[in-house]
Image (tube, coloured by chain):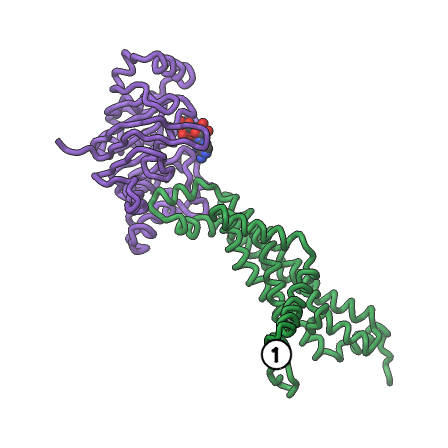
Amino acid sequence: MIQVLPRWLEDLLTVLSYSDELIAGLSTTLSLYFTALIMGFFLGLGFAIGRQYGGIITSRISTAYIELIRGTPLLVQLFLFYFFPYSLSATLELLGLLPLPLDWSIQIIGPGGQVITILNHRILTCYLMLGLNSTAYQAEYLRGAIASVSAEQLLAAQSLGLSRAGGIRSIVLPQSLRRVIPSWSNEAAYLPKYTVVAYFIGVEDLFAAAHFIVARTFLTLTTYLLVALIYLVLVTVISRILDYVHDRTKIPGL
Amino acid sequence: MEKPLLQVKNIWKAYDELQVLKGVSFDVEEGEVKVIFGPSGSGKSTLLRCINMLTPPDKGTVILQGTNLMDSDTNLNMIRSKIGMVFQHFNLFLHLKAIDNVSLGPRRVLGLSKDEATERALDALIQVKMEKWADHYPAQLSGGQQQRVGIARALVMNPVLILFDEPTSALDPELIGEVLQVMLDIAKSGTTMVVVTHEMGFARAVATEMIFIDEGVIVEKGTPRHFAISPETERAKQFLHRLEVLYGHHEELLEPEDKEEGNS
Ligand SMILES: Nc1ncnc2c1ncn2[C@@H]1O[C@H](COP(=O)(O)OP(=O)(O)O)[C@@H](O)[C@H]1O
Ligand SMILES: [Mg+2]
């Protein structure tokens, strides 16, 4: 007896038969995401501290960076960052100098014998630009949280003999890192979706995988719905985890 | 003659255009309780922060036990660890339990182990009768309890001098007594203190000298008795009169000598 599958299920199975592409795309997306998030966090913390506690120059530089990044489209930043080395290289060649080596890549052999590119100029550009972009947004969230810890507490720490840096480390940061979680969740939830810009310079992320599958199967709706669902699950899981962390680190009585 | 523990000489401090301190000088001998009072905005908090260099003066010298704090090669962190400070708004570390608020200094500054620091912190909490609340967070404590933890945080460092900046003025009237009592106990144990306060009852009980400050200068100095009976300057007279009208006397908040418990 032959059972006829519903049409949508059949389409879904067809799309899922490209699981290799989907998994490769998803892992690229995830690694772009986590790299940018972590890089953005540490650099953002640096900028936030620089803007809040730095001297006039440090604080100006931090502010300028944050405003510049937040005031321009990510895709434009990415294109500039991507094409600049090529223009530079061309200029160098015109001047009779050596061009920049931009077509390098680091590859590994996957379990199925396939060649996987883990890093090249495009991918590196994406990691850096997404990280540098996220830095600006995270810096603002972090600065807000740092500013919400009263300066008086830092004075109290200094009155005990702690250095300013010591006070920032033991008093201001533990409190601001707790307080930043709810607003920082925004960035953690936006960033997975921003990683699709990688597609526009030819990095094979999840979105690129979707394009590839659509080109082969013409199952536009099914493919994009599936991909949307994957982003949705990812973002939901991240938000839940952060809610949980926020709850567990709450300061009693506050 | 012994050198004073603290010498404040001709301190000047301005915030931009605003000249806040205009040549303030006084000495504090070991074991003394100096009470500073004066109108709001007269520069009292600024003066205290100049003493431990949290706000470095523009001009003048501060000498603690022979060390000039204005010298650029003075280790200010080390000096500050010897000067306790108690704040008007307590300024407890909100993410730390009472005991950890108190043990932070001994651990991070004096370099004691966690156990040693906790043990010392508990002793300090006992001194301010807050040992039962050791595991509470600041937000779970009343203002009076928070301020007693603030005092323990200063005491635990065994400072040579403690600065108090209006320690009771942010408190509800019914909570002032428990804090004043703790401060009296500390004063009577011989601790050197510089106290900015308008609690004339406290001053009368323990102050060795009172300093009246207005508009950044010392207007009048004298014993509590002097200010109670015969203040000389018109400004001091007026201010003391206003204080009495505004606050009344809080002496009744201090319990009689013979009773043991300061709070309850
Ligand atoms: N960090 C600061 N920046 C600018 N002005 C200040 C600062 N701290 C205090 N002032 C001003 O200096 C004057 C004296 O303040 P303060 O020392 O706090 O007086 P008091 O403690 O006697 O009320 C006030 O006019 C106050 O507004
Ligand atoms: Mg004040």
Percent coordinates x, y for residue B99 in the rendering: 36, 46
Q: Residue furthest bottom?
A: A113
Question: In front here: A254 or B82?
Answer: B82
Q: Which chain is green?
A: A
Question: At x 73% / y 74%, what residue is drawn?
Answer: A209
At x 38%, y 13%, the residue is B238
What residue do we see at 41% from left, 31% from top?
Answer: B14
Query: What amino acid type is highlighted by mark number 1?
Result: Trp
Q: Image quadrant of ligand 1?
A: top left
Which residue was labeled with disc 1? Answer: A104
Pick out the residue farthest to the left. Answer: B1
Answer left or right for A54 relative to A121: left
Q: Chain of mark 1?
A: A
Can residue A97 be spotted in the picture?
Answer: yes
In this view of the protein, which residue sits in the foreground, B160 or A36? Answer: A36
Query: Tag 1: Cα neighbours inside 10 Å, few (<14), some, or many (≥20)?
Result: few
Q: Which chain is purple?
A: B
Front position in the image: B100 or A30: A30
- Could one spot residue A120 in this view of the protein? no
Q: Is residue A76 above or below residue B79?
A: below
Q: Residue at x 69, y 71 (%)?
A: A205
Residue A118, given in percent of the width and then of the height, sits at: 61, 77
Instruction: Say which of A236 and A89 sits in front.
Output: A89
Q: Position of residue A124 (x, y in %)?
A: 61, 71
Q: Secondary structure at mark 1?
A: loop
Residue B19 at x, y = what percent? Answer: 41, 27
Q: Is residue B120 rendered to the left or right of residue A55? A: left
User: Quadrant of the rendered structure where residue A38 is?
Assistant: bottom right
> Which quadrant holds the C terminus of chain B?
top left
Tell me if residue A199 comes above or below residue B32 in the rendering. Answer: below
